[in-house]
Image (spheres, coloured by chain):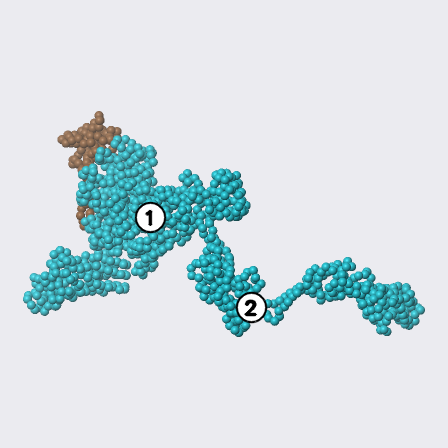
């Protein structure tokens, strides 16, 4: 509500008849132009009568929309008849040509013509907007004006990183916005605006290398001729450099450790690096982290004025590698409980061929690590590794595994028969060897079948080993003619050789002959073993008998002129090796080391076989048992460990393997047991991922944050801000416990930021009369109504209302808050949900979660407060009032809480509503249109939907109705869903003596008529509020009775209801004629002086209407 | 009672007859009115008073008519130029002709009848 209008202005606007005049001042660059709808000289300036129509000043956005800014617009129709200057010599349209009309400011004043100059009030300041239109027919120029706040919302709030400002900025950060931090401290990411130079080394260097080649040109990098670079955690001081090389004279500089570095390792120049936390200045920068790891406070400084974290050398962090590595931790000591046999072999890794042994007789192997373990980094998983095998498989006994501090972690896996060893071997049984007689050769000793295939084998020592004999009788060639043969003619052969003695190995006979008739047979021991018929014979056949028993015989048969010619018959006989003498034809070699049969002497020679390729292997087989295969077994200890541990976990932690049982009697052998570790190595890594906890120089108070962005970023002059109102908003947000802590994106516009801030602080701004007000949406209970508008204030038939669209109902508010500004995804750490079960029951669950990202809210209570506030505002289908009032009420402003009473169409009484918009329909003499102030109000939880004022009321949905008087409207009343009626009983003053005021509020259901259709449940109460101004005579208790004509005249009317006082003071009984329920709760402090009679006398219509209902004259 | 005349600088139109009775002087107050829901009267007045002089002749002599046509067409140039109107009471007003069409009819006596309306400036 506006309270600072000039007195005369207030007087005039309140008049039923007044004389308003609007004045417009166009602030062109060239000169101001003064226009009105009639001629007037005001404050020394002549206003030309060029305004044809002032139009309406109204919201540019739908005021019912959620979280609107309230920019308003107006369209002026201007005669193009002058320029608004004192002379008015030129057309107004001149300005359209002479300068850019857009954004020209226009002040519009309202003045009542019979008041002084100082009594004018600035309606608002506007700027000209597109489109600018003119009409030929009317010679009118149409100018759209919007309120000046429109301009303040357009700019972006932040700057970007530029090379002009930051020459050495990290390339990826150039062009990024410099965000604005509010409140705090909060952890924020940074922008690298000065990055230390770096290059990569060419070739691997050792820890003492003094020449380091580079892949990049150091000239282009601008590297100093001497300085310090850092590779990994090692600093290196160099005293000179070439374009691609640096010359080092100090490895491990400044207390670092010299180390070798791989080819391609990154070397960073030790020089300042700047990291910008946000739009400066800030008030505190603490807890700097590099890649999420706290940076040593000695490793950086801060510059609050410029919002910088400065690292004198490139920021790095000591962290753990992303990939894990494996290592082992050995035991070194036997525990006191150890009873195993040679238990130390379980951890002696130099003697893996030997094992510790546990058995029924040596049941316990206990080992531990007694010495410190070198730091490994972050332990990811820990295993106990045991390699074991057994002398036989077993199924009953077992070996229990226990780790001190963790308990029993399992048992050794027992081998079964499948785990027994199966031996397969290839054994060398021959060797390559050579013979002294130049017969040198190797045998294929890899062929397992060699022996079987070859066995004793023959070594040739001469070119001929076969004795050949030819026939010496008959002489060859021998021809036998058939003509001279009659019948069979046997021919005997005699072989001409001498047997050398010994065994004959093989015998072959070769025959070359031509047979033209008859046949030739070979006969052995009188048996024909082979015959040859007519043809040429050239054949060698084996003989298995002594050649002395073989002869040929020619059979003539009946063939005439046939003959046989034998040209060659040869017998070859091969003898065995034990043959002696010069006629021996072959020998055999008996294989034996160093020995061979001498074919000449028949004795072995010790040097005949020489140069064996290797010694014979000795293979021993223990055949008395069947040992099992070795089993490598891992026991994952990680699951037994709560939290994280370091290498101290291993020291003095005993591992005990206990043989349990006496059934199998096996020996379990353990060649190796140790801890296996999966860990992430600790390492130092450069990173530009720098974050810090930052406290902004901008207050965390929401009102002050809004003030900052509107004035500092939007350009709103501070003098336009209503200071007292602003201070009140600050106080209210502070009182509500609201504060902002977060980041405003630099690329946001002021409009976007203001809407965001308003949403998250329940605030809005009201631009009016050239000023800006900051307003906090208080809860209804914390506010007072500022004015009651009644029928005298409302334009006739101007009232209308509409119910909120269902699509705008939200009955489930799920808000996200406490944002992690450094997170890559899912940044919100907390949520809060507020739900209206009543609304959900009626409308179904309606939510719009995208609205409720409260990124500036970190406090749980604030998030809950916001969620419940918006739920209360949006969960019910509120109604919107629209009506016209007059300039008298132009002091009403958006956000005011008012009541309204109407007659006729709506018939509502003092319904409370929020003003969500106030517009103007300015007068128009041309149309005989009076000025109106158009009010748009939102009504909740009271909403009235009344279609008729007479005897039929239809109430739709959840509705609360206030009625000033009881009425007959319950006839034909249809109620859907829940309905509450509040009836103020307008009691007659002549019935009850009421000194000041009495308010009866009846939540009542009474005498439900037949026509009342109620779908579900109706609950009624009667509550009578008796205020302290009620004085009731004598008795507060009222009884009733039907009169029977007794008593004085008129006292006990026959059949009438008589009420009378009683002694009881705490209840009231009303008669049957009251069509209400009858209990009354009287406050204890009611003062009763006399007797109260509920009646209105003879014939009274309200309580009784029978004769004598009320004592005559009472 | 004097005979009305029009004067603009050196131009003068002195009629020979006065307009027919009744001689009308319209005065209009520029105001807007309204009613509240309770029936209360509301009004705004814009401090503008319009005075109009509708002049009607039933027997305007031809010469006067001719002079009036010249005045309307050339001197006053319709509503373009204001001039001085001297009424029958010999009171001067600065007026402008707001009649867009000069429409006079001639009767059997060769006299003209018609009207013009002037508005005080």
Indicate whether A147 appears above or below B94: below
Which one is nearer the viewer's eye here, A497 or A859?
Answer: A497
Chain to which the residue tagged by mark 2 belongs: A
Q: Residues within 10 Å of mark 1 (few under 14, many from 20)?
A: many
Decide which of A129, A1029 is in the foreground and name it. Answer: A1029
The mark that comes first in sequence, 2 or 1, is 1
Q: Quadrant of the image for the C terminus of chain A?
A: bottom left
Query: SS at mark 2?
Result: strand
* Picture colour for chain A: cyan
Tell me: residue A537, above or below residue A753.
Answer: below
Numbered disc 1: what chain?
A
Residue A105 visible = yes
Relative to the observer, which residue lies in front, A333 or A226?
A333
Q: Are marks 2 and 1 in contact (CB under 8 Å)?
A: no
Horizontal arrangement in the rendering, residue A464 relative to residue A78 (left or right): right
Chain shown in brown: B
Side of A553 relative to A50 (left or right):
right
Q: Is residue A511 visible?
A: no
Q: Which residue is mark 1?
A: A183
The part of the image, by quadrant, that contains residue A581 is bottom right
Element under disc 1: loop
The residue positioned 35% from the left and 53% from the top of the image is A817
Question: Residue A1023, which numbered label?
Answer: none
For marks 2 and 1, give the CA distance: 71 Å
Camera-side residue of A486 and A991: A486
């Amino acid at each position: 509500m506006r309270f600072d209008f000039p007195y005369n202005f207030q007087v005039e606007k309140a008049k039923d008849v007044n004389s308003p005049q609007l004045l417009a001042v166009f602030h062109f660059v060239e000169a101001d132009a003064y226009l009105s709808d009639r001629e007037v000289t005001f404050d020394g300036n002549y206003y030309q009568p060029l305004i044809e129509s002032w139009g309406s000043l109204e919201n540019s956005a739908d005021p019912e929309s959620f979280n609107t800014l309230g920019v308003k617009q107006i369209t002026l129709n201007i005669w193009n008849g002058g320029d608004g200057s004192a002379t008015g010599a030129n057309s107004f349209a001149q300005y359209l040509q002479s300068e850019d009309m857009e954004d020209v400011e226009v002040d519009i004043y309202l003045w009542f013509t019979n008041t002084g100059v100082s009594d004018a009030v600035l309606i608002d300041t506007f700027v000209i907007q597109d489109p600018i239109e003119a009409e030929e027919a009317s010679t009118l120029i149409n100018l759209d004006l919007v309120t000046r706040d429109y301009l303040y919302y357009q700019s972006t709030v932040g700057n970007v990183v530029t090379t002009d400002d930051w020459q050495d900025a990290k390339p990826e950060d150039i062009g990024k916005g410099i965000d604005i931090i509010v409140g705090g401290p909060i952890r924020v990411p940074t922008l690298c605006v000065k990055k230390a130079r770096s290059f990569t080394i060419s070739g691997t260097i050792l820890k003492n290398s003094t020449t380091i080649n580079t892949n990049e040109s150091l000239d282009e990098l601008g590297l100093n001729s001497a300085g310090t670079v850092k590779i990994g955690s090692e600093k290196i001081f160099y005293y000179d450099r070439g374009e691609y090389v640096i010359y080092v004279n100090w490895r491990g500089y400044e207390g670092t450790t010299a180390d070798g570095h791989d080819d391609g390792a990154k070397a960073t120049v030790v020089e300042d690096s700047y990291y910008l936390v946000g739009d400066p200045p800030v008030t505190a920068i603490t807890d700097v982290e590099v890649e999420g790891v706290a940076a040593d406070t000695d490793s950086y400084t801060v510059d609050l004025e410029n919002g910088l974290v400065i690292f004198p050398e490139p920021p790095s962090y000591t962290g753990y590698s992303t990939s894990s590595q494996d290592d082992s931790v050995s035991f070194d000591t036997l525990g006191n409980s150890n009873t195993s046999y040679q238990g130390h072999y379980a951890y002696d890794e130099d003697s893996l061929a030997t094992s510790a042994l546990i058995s029924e007789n040596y049941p316990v192997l206990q080992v531990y690590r007694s010495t410190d373990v070198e730091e490994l980094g972050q332990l990811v998983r820990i295993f106990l590794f045991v390699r074991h095998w057994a002398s036989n498989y077993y199924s009953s006994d077992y070996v229990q595994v226990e780790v001190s501090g963790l308990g029993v972690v399992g048992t050794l896996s027992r081998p079964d028969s499948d785990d027994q060893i199966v031996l397969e071997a290839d054994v060398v049984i021959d060797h390559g060897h050579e013979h002294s007689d130049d017969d040198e050769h190797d045998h294929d000793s890899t062929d397992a079948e060699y022996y079987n295939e070859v066995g004793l084998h023959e070594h040739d020592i001469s070119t001929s080993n076969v004795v050949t004999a030819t026939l010496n009788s008959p002489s060859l060639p021998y021809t036998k003619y058939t003509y001279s043969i009659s019948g069979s003619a046997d021919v005997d052969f005699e072989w001409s050789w001498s047997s050398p003695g010994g065994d004959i190995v093989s015998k072959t006979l070769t025959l070359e002959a031509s047979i033209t008739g008859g046949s030739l047979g070979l006969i052995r021991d009188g048996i024909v073993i082979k015959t040859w018929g007519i043809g040429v014979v050239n054949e060698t056949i084996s003989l298995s008998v002594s050649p002395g028993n073989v002869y040929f015989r020619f059979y003539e048969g009946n063939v005439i002129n046939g003959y046989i010619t034998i040209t060659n018959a040869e017998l070859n006989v091969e003898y065995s090796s034990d043959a002696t003498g010069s006629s021996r034809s072959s020998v055999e070699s008996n294989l034996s080391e160093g020995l061979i049969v001498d074919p000449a002497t028949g004795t072995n020679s010790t040097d005949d076989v020489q140069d064996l390729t290797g010694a014979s292997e000795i293979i021993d087989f223990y055949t008395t048992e069947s040992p099992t295969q070795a089993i490598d077994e891992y026991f994952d200890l990680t699951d037994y460990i709560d939290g994280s541990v370091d290498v101290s976990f291993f020291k003095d932690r005993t591992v005990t393997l206990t043989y349990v049982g006496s059934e199998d009697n096996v020996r379990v052998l353990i060649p190796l047991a140790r801890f296996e570790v999966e860990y992430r190595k600790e390492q130092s890594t450069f990173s530009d991922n720098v974050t810090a906890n930052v406290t902004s120089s901008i207050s965390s108070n929401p009102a002050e944050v809004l003030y900052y962005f509107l004035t500092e970023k939007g350009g709103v002059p501070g003098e336009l801000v209503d200071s007292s109102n602003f201070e009140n908003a600050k106080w209210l947000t502070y009182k509500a416990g609201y504060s902002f802590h977060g980041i405003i994106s630099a690329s946001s516009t002021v409009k976007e930021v203001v809407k965001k801030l308003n949403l998250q602080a329940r605030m809005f701004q009201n631009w009016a009369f050239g000023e800006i007000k900051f307003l906090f949406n208080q809860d209804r209970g914390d506010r007072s109504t500022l004015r009651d508008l009644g029928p005298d204030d409302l334009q006739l038939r101007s009232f209308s209302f509409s119910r909120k669209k269902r699509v705008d109902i939200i009955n489930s508010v799920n808000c996200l808050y406490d944002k992690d500004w450094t997170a890559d995804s899912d940044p919100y750490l907390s949520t809060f949900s507020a739900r209206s079960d009543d609304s959900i029951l009626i409308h179904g669950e309606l939510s719009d979660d995208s609205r409720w990202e409260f990124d500036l809210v970190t406090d749980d209570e604030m998030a809950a407060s916001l969620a419940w506030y918006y739920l209360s505002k949006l969960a019910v289908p509120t109604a919107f009032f629209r009506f016209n009032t007059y300039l008298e009420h132009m002091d009403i402003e958006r956000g005011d809480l008012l009541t309204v009473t109407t007659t006729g169409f709506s018939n509502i009484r003092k319904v409370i509503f929020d003003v969500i918009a106030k517009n103007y329909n300015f007068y128009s003499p041309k149309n005989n249109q009076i000025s109106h102030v158009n009010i748009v109000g939102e009504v909740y939880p009271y909403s009235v939907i009344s279609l008729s004022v007479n005897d039929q009321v239809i109430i739709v949905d959840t509705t609360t109705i206030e009625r000033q008087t009881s009425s007959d409207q319950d006839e034909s009343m249809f109620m859907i869903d829940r309905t509450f009626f509040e009836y103020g009983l307008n009691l007659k003053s002549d019935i009850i003596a009421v000194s000041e005021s009495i308010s009866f509020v009846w939540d009542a259901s009474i005498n439900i008529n037949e026509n009342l259709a109620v779908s579900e449940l109706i609950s009624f109460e009667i509550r009578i509020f008796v205020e302290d101004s009620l004085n009731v005579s004598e008795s507060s208790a009222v009884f009733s009775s039907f009169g029977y004509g007794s008593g004085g005249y008129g006292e006990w009317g026959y059949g009438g209801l008589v009420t009378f006082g009683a002694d009881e003071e705490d209840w009231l009984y009303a008669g049957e004629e009251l069509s209400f329920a009858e209990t009354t709760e009287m406050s204890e402090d009611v003062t009763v002086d006399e007797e109260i009679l509920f009646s209105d006398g003879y014939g009274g219509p309200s309580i009784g209407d029978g004769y004598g209902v009320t004592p005559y004259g009472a | 009672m004097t005979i009305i005349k029009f004067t603009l600088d050196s131009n003068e139109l002195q009629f020979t007859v006065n307009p027919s009775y009744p001689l009308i002087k319209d005065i209009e107050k520029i105001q807007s009115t309204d009613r509240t829901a309770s029936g209360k009267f509301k009004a705004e007045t814009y401090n503008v008073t319009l005075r109009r002089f509708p002049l009607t002749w039933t027997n305007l002599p031809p010469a006067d008519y001719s002079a009036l046509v010249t005045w309307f067409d050339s001197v006053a140039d319709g509503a373009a130029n204001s001039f001085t109107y001297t009424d029958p009471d010999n009171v001067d007003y600065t007026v402008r002709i707001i009649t867009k069409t000069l429409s006079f009819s001639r009767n059997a006596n060769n006299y003209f009848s018609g009207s013009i309306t002037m508005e005080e400036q």
